[in-house]
Amino acid sequence: MTPLAQEFLALTPEKRREVHFVLCQRALEKWTAYIAGRKEMTYTESVCGTTQQLDLSLPSGALASARKGRDIAGVASRYGEPIVAMQDSDLEFPEPIQFGYYALYNLFRKYVAGKVIDDWLIVNQALSTESDESQVGPVLRAAIKKTGEDKTRSKWFEGAIESGYRRHFSRSNRWNSATVGPSASRTAVPVTPPAQVRRVWIARCPCAAELGSSRASWPRR
């Protein structure tokens, strides 16, 4: 486990929540930039062959609901079809956008639906929106700093960053995830493992289907 992962996991639940919202706000900004100029997005649902129009406001509704701690816009029911479509490969986004979409969905599930979602999963998915891996550490560092708990940064970590140790993690801590997203499917069957691997250097761990996954690594505890 890396020092940054340890630092996050050492935070209180309240501070971890703050980090989640900082990172998911950033993920939402990337989603907003992605859909900018698009009046609509459609996809074909393979089971019935029908054309569906994607609700572009869902991620922002998920974040707003999570901040309130309640479903303020019928988000839970609106997410059903697109999440299933993503797992069936009927609906596809560029990889960083896909993980941001799942991060916001899992944020909603944790803070509104009361689901047991591992705190690090949301962090991993949100960090996976960073196309430039060199920004992963600084983005997480800045999010932790905003909580006011930026006191556990080790000299080892500072030296590691300066010496390019980040590059070591990006090559050594890769893993194939069990699923791409939460296991909400028409038949409630776990999804097939994806082919691609997302490289993010923070840490490593297993993945439960009901939680979704990121292609970021995960800390063993």
Image (cartoon, helix red, strand yellow):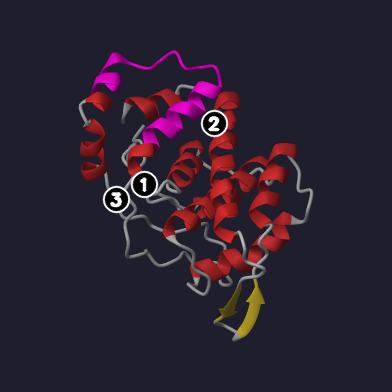
Between residues 147 and 29, which one lies in front from this camera angle? 29
Q: Quadrant of the N terminus?
A: top left
**Magenta region, main secondary structure:** helix
Instruction: Estimate how packed mark 2 is, as few (under 14), some (14 to 19) or many (20 or more) residues with alpha carbons within 10 Å.
Output: many
Residue bearing mark 3: 175
| Residue 189, horizontal then vertical, whole percent | 50, 67
Which amino acid type is marked by label 2? Val
Instruction: Estimate how packed mark 3 is, as few (under 14), some (14 to 19) or many (20 or more) residues with alpha carbons within 10 Å.
Output: many
Between residues 109 and 202, which one lies in front from this camera angle? 202
| In the image, residue 78 lies in the stretch drawn in magenta | no
| Residue 12, horizontal then vertical, whole percent | 54, 22
| In the image, residue 149 lies in the stretch drawn in magenta | yes
**167 sits to left or right of 23:** left
Mark closer to the observer (2, 3): 2
Determine the residue positioned at 68% across, 47% down.
113
Inter-mark Cα distance, 1 to 2: 22 Å
The dot on residue 206 is: 1
Asked whether the residues under the numbered discs 3 and 1 touch, taking CB atoms below 8 Å apart as contact, a structural biologist would say no
The dot on residue 19 is: 2
Q: Is any atom of residue 123 visible in this view?
A: yes
**36 sits to left or right of 180:** right
* Count of marks placed on residues: 3
Q: Which residues are magenta?
A: 136-159
